[in-house]
Image (cartoon, helix red, strand yellow):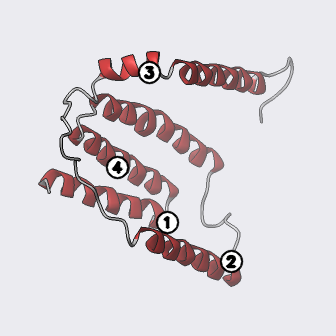
Amino acid sequence: MHPLFLFLSFVALLSALGVVFAKNPVHSVLFLILTFFSLSGHYLLLNAQFLAAVNIIVYAGAIMVLFLFVIMFLNLNVDTEPHKPALAKVAAAVAGGSLLLILVAALKDVQPTGVPAGTVFNSQIGMVDQLGMKLYTDFLLPFELASVLFLVAMVGAVMLGKREAGERNF
């Protein structure tokens, strides 16, 4: 295996664990940004430069700013967090262990497959022009439906955020 792949995988796994186990929510968001950057490195190794750039711009940029805004807006701290009963903690541990057991049982007999014999490698598969051609020919209807959905969501957000005359926010 490529050493850069192993390094990026190690960073991704450690930072994902940091997201889960960090006590401070801001630190969790920072670990999540590091996870997104390491996943973008994996996309670069797969010759998907456009996907790597979009991952950094959209997820590590816009979505993380939104997460940080919500975390800081809610002003989460230990004093305001309600105490969780022991039964809830035990139930969460049992549910997580059950999920792990199901995943291990489902994936125990899976054999990784290599490249099938006779397959020609296309080095242009992850490039922007190939993605654009595929998006605007084979997937034009889902692309347009997604854009209409985003437009409706933006209009809804503006309508919800609009203040009436004389209304105060806080």
Between residue 117 and residue 71, name the one nearer to us.
117
Q: CA distance from mark 2 to mark 1?
A: 18 Å
* For marks 1 and 3 on the same chain, the one whose residue lies earlier in the sequence: 1
- For the residue carrying disc 1, how many other residues have a C-alpha within 10 Å: few (<14), some (14-19), or many (20+)? few
Residue depth check, mark 1 versus mark 3: number of the one nearer the observer: 3
Q: Residue at x 68, y 77 (%)?
A: 88
Left or right of 153 on screen, residue 29:
left
Q: Give the distance between the C-alpha atoms of the residues marked 3 and 4, in whole angstroms.
A: 29 Å
Q: Say which amino acid is labelled 3.
A: Leu
According to the picture, the residue beneath numbered tag 2 turns out to be: 88
Q: Quadrant of residue 27?
A: bottom left
- Distance in Å between CA atoms under marks 3 and 2: 45 Å
Foreground: 61 or 127? 127
Drawn side of residue 167 relative to residue 124, left or right? right
Image quadrant where residue 3 sits: bottom left
Q: Quadrant of the C terminus?
A: top right
Residue linked to disc 1: 23
Callout 3 secondary element: helix
Residue 163 in the image: state x and y as whole percent.
Answer: 80, 22
* Residue type at the position of mark 2: Ala
- Disc 3 versus disc 4: nearer the observer: 3
Judge from the rendering whether residue 95 lies leftward or rightward of residue 13; answer left or right: right
* Residue at x-position 68% and y-position 63%: 80
Q: Which residue is mark 3?
A: 135
Residue 34: give its label: 4
N-terminal of the pair, mark 4 or mark 1, is 1
Q: Is residue 137 above or below residue 97?
A: above
